[in-house]
């Protein structure tokens, strides 16, 4: 799924009136009755209220877990296979069922085993009318599974948990919007490497998405790319890598504190090679929320990339925590959208 980069980086990243001319000779009583009737009939219907910001409490963690379960039920989703294509069709179909604009970006890319097909899935919730050239906030998750791990490998936490949660975030944000910013949902194919991470092995989908944002001009209007990864573990302990946009990491910690789960979030000792890196390299602010302690005991990661990565290891509670923190981070950046976070390349 991802690969640690143990960097030695200092810990300093911390309400209409109706005017009438009365008919001549009309009695005062009749006139008053007429006016009362007109006032009642012409009173404007109340305008629908529009939420100022997303409500984290509206996230349905149970729905998120069901989305995870449905994705796992599709079977293996190894990049370049028909399983990955089926998964992409499933994700696009779910987004469209929520009323979200969705497309599958099919492309081919070189790998250690030759060129292979990949299928990114992109969902968009446009900003509310009148927002002008509104900025973008992107959520991201890879959906492919690691190949070569045996016939029973489910990839329940890595990568179904984050992809299922993204679907529930998309459903809720679409239902509550539109918002003052554009919101995008990026499902990456080909995050997993076949042999060893490099320019032609792994991170295929996120590299493609980053290039597309630069090409169409949205890179400079992007407030954040928040990648979610391995966020379903029953014992959720989110570890935020240091090789991300510092201001976004700080916003993530503030969101966790506001949700009352700051004790579940910590800063990694080093960096991590994950889907946020291609965005950083393109000059786009990005960070990742990941639980990289997924194992049989605290501090261990021995379920990762094994057949132990199964649905029974996940919980709706953990998905709810991760989703609500992500919404709170989005809310903060909506309020400060006039200033794009400063970016430093990794």
Image: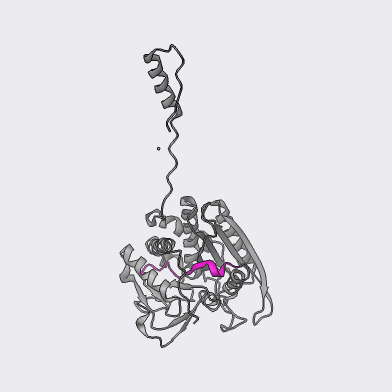
Q: Which one is nearer the viewer's eye here, 155 or 307?
A: 155
Asked if residue 227 lies in the magenta stretch, the reply is: yes
Q: Residue at x 46, y 51 (%)?
A: 176
User: From this viewpoint, is residue 141 visible?
Assistant: yes
Q: Which residues are magenta?
A: 217-236
Q: How is the image coloured?
A: one colour
Along the horizontal axis of the image, is 190 left or right of 10?
Answer: right
Residue found at x 42% / y 65%: 312
Q: Quadrant of residue 214?
A: bottom right
Give the image location of residue 62, x and y in percent. Answer: 42, 56
Q: Which residue sits furthest bottom?
A: 8
* Picture coordinates of residue 173, whole percent (x, y): 47, 55
Residue 184 drawn at (x, y percent): 53, 62
Q: Is residue 67 magenta?
A: no
- Residue toward you, 287 or 147: 287
Depth check: give the residue in front, 203 or 297. Answer: 203
Residue 201: percent from left, percent from top = 60, 80
Classify residue 118 as left or right of residue 250. Answer: right
């Amino acid at each position: 799924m991802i690969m640690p980069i143990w960097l030695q980086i200092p810990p300093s990243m911390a309400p209409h009136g109706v005017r009438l001319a009365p008919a001549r000779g009309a009695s005062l009583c009749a006139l008053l009755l007429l006016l009362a009737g007109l006032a009642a009939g012409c009173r404007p219907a109340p305008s629908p209220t529009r939420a100022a910001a997303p409500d984290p409490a509206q996230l349905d963690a149970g729905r998120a877990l069901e989305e995870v379960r449905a994705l796992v039920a599709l079977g293996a989703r190894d990049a370049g296979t028909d399983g990955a294509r089926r998964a992409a069709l499933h994700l696009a179909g779910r987004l469209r069922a929520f009323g979200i604009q969705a497309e599958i970006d099919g492309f081919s890319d070189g790998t250690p085993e030759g060129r292979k097909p990949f299928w990114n899935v992109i969902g968009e919730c446009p900003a509310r009318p009148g927002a002008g050239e509104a900025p973008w906030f992107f959520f991201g998750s890879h959906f492919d599974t690691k190949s070569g791990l045996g016939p029973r490998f489910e990839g329940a936490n890595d990568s179904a948990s984050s992809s299922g949660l993204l679907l529930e975030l998309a459903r809720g944000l679409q239902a509550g919007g539109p918002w003052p910013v554009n919101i995008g949902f990026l499902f990456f194919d080909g995050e997993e490497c076949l042999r060893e991470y490099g320019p032609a092995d792994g991170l295929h989908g996120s590299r493609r998405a980053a290039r597309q944002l630069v090409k169409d001009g949205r890179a400079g209007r992007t407030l954040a790319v928040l990648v979610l990864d391995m966020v379903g573990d029953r014992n959720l302990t989110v570890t935020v890598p240091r090789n991300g946009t510092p201001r976004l990491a700080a916003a993530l910690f503030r969101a966790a504190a506001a949700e009352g789960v700051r004790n579940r979030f910590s800063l990694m000792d080093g960096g991590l090679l994950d889907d946020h890196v291609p965005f950083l390299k393109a000059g786009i602010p990005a960070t990742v929320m990941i639980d990289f302690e997924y194992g049989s005991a605290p501090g261990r990661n021995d379920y990762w990339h094994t057949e132990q990565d199964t649905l029974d290891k996940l919980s709706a509670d953990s998905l709810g925590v991760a989703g609500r923190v992500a919404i709170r981070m989005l809310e903060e950046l909506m309020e400060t959208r006039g200033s794009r976070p400063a970016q430093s390349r990794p």
